[in-house]
Image (cartoon, rainbow, N blue to C red):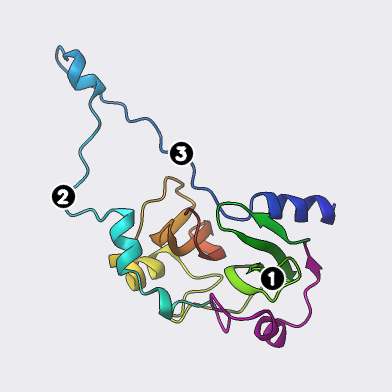
Amino acid sequence: MRRVALVALVACHRPVPVPAPVPVRVAAIAPDAAALDAEPDAPDDAPDDANLADEFPVDKQAIGPLHIGMTDKQAIAVLGAPQLRSVAVLMGALGDYESVWAFGSATLQMSGAKPKGPFRVASISVAGRSGFKTPEGIGIGSTREEIVAVYGKYLGHSDDPAQVLVGSVYFGLLFTLEQERVVAIFLGAMAF
């Protein structure tokens, strides 16, 4: 079962946002066809993902002592030896080899120029009983309200009501919630 889960992690190493629902407009009186097919207007003050990616303070993001770009040796010094480590796979779009390393409540997507490394952290996921928090103090168990209070101006677009995106899919924090409390945190690029 662990091998199947690890293969699934390698195959789908980045979370993919759920497609947006098709907007439906209901007209009260004799609608014309063009009005029914029109997309709803986005608010003028709504930031787009590209702007959020530029504005979000990437260099200040971390989850506990883990940060994007740290070396494989630094990650092992913090977390110990990985419990599971996938075979490095060449990612054609990036030109790097990527491997998933699982450390209990933390999982790291590692990236390197060669299949045997050295590697650097490309993304970070924490869940379960992780005590790690973002520099702003958000961690497992934090509430949606706390996320909004801390990251309000950087809130991105998520079509899943159980997720809160901070930054953008190009680089950001993705908080997964159950009963309005954080149960998992992802830091990194979800699209490129």
| Vertical placement of residue 112 versus 23, above or below | below
Residue 44 is tagged as 2
Asked whether residue 77 is drawn in magenta, I would say: yes
- Given the image, on which type of amino acid does mark 2 rest? Asp
Q: Earlier in the sequence, mark 2 or mark 1?
A: 2
Residue 47 pos. (x, y %):
25, 56
List the residue tagged with mark 3: 19
| Residue drawn at the location 18% of the way across and 54% of the way down | 45
Q: Earlier in the sequence, mark 2 or mark 3?
A: 3
| Residue drawn at the location 58% of the way across and 55% of the way down | 14
The answer for how far apart the CA atoms under marks 2 and 3 are is: 22 Å
List the residue tagged with mark 1: 105
| Residue drawn at the location 31% of the way across and 26% of the way down | 24
Asked whether residue 59 is drawn in magenta, I would say: no
| Vertical placement of residue 48 versus 99, above or below | above
Q: Nearer the viewer, mark 1 or mark 3?
A: 3
Residues drawn in magenta: 64-86
Marks 2 and 1 in Cβ contact (< 8 Å):
no
In this view of the protein, which residue sits in the foreground, 121 or 19?
121
| Vertical placement of residue 190 versus 41, above or below | below
Determine whether the residue tagged by mark 1 lies in a helix, strand or loop.
loop
Residue 131 pos. (x, y %):
61, 79
* Mark 1 residue crowding within 10 angstroms, few (<14) / some (14–19) / many (20+): some
- Given the image, on which type of amino acid does mark 1 rest? Ser
Tell me which corner region of the image, top left, top right, bottom left or bottom right, holds residue 79.
bottom right
| Residue drawn at the location 58% of the way across and 80% of the way down | 70
In this view of the protein, which residue sits in the foreground, 162 or 3?
3
Residue 174 pos. (x, y %):
48, 61
The answer for how far apart the CA atoms under marks 1 and 3 are is: 28 Å
- Given the image, on which type of amino acid does mark 3 rest? Pro
